[in-house]
Image (cartoon, rainbow, N blue to C red):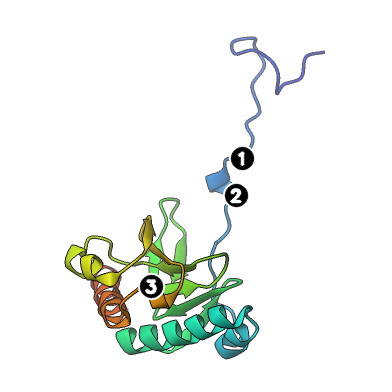
Amino acid sequence: MTSVLSSPAGAGDKAVRKPTRKATAKKKIVRTAGSVAGFIDALTPEAKRRDSRQLAQIMRRASGRSAMLWGNGIVGFGRYRYQTSAGRENEAPMIAFSPRGAKLSLYHMDLEASALLRRLGRYQTGQRCLYLARLSDVDVSVLEALCAHSFRRVRKAHGG
């Protein structure tokens, strides 16, 4: 007997499809009730802890919003709701950072703000993300302006 999963197309058996990743995907980022201060205080080494505290202050001033812990290691400021292509409603921070890994990851940054990016210092980019090895590599006043600009862009696009 031939397995339904391995039968060739047109063999008369209906192929059973595995659920797609999209159909089984869960929310990647959800707000948690954890303490932002407790999360940052538990970071090692000390340099990452110090940079995370400073970055939290920068994003707080830039957004005018309090920090919230999202998922298992994202510190976010503000929040907005959006609808996925599958019709589900999700929530995300307007701007955020994560101190996981070797670099600080800053989320929802406007990478088209070229005038600010030219003056920022050393960084790398990803899709709407900015990666910093350490805060001492960048001009923190330019970083704060970029965070404020990015926050306004997200707020304009999504409300909140």
Tell me which residue sits at (25%, 79%) in the image.
Answer: 145
The local secondary structure at tag 3 comes to helix
Is 117 placed above or below 42 here? above
Which residue is most to the left?
115
**Mark 1 touching mark 2, by CB under 8 A?**
yes
Is 35 placed left or right of 109 in the picture?
A: right
Residue 128 point in image, percent of width and height: 35, 60
Residue annotated with mark 1: 19
Distance in Å between CA atoms under marks 1 and 2? 7 Å
Residue under label 2: 24
Q: Amino acid at mark 3?
A: Asp
Q: Which mark is residue 137?
A: 3
Q: Nearer the viewer, mark 3 or mark 1?
A: 3
Query: Would you identify the image quadrant in which residue 63 lies?
Result: bottom left
Q: Quadrant of the N terminus?
A: top right
Q: Amino acid at mark 2?
A: Thr
Q: Nearer the viewer, residue 3 or 36?
A: 36
Q: Earlier in the sequence, mark 1 or mark 2?
A: 1
Which image quadrant for residue 123? bottom left
Mark 3 or mark 2: whose residue is earlier in sequence:
2
Mark whose residue sits in front, 3 or 2: 3
Q: Secondary structure at mark 1?
A: loop
Q: Which residue lies at the image location 59% right of the left edge and 10% below the top edge? A: 10
Of the image marks 3 and 1, the number of the one nearer the N terminus: 1
Residue 147 visible in image = yes
- Percent position of residue 29, x then y: 53, 67
Q: Position of residue 75 (x, y in %)?
A: 50, 78
The relative height of residue 49 versus residue 13 in the rendered view (above or below) is below
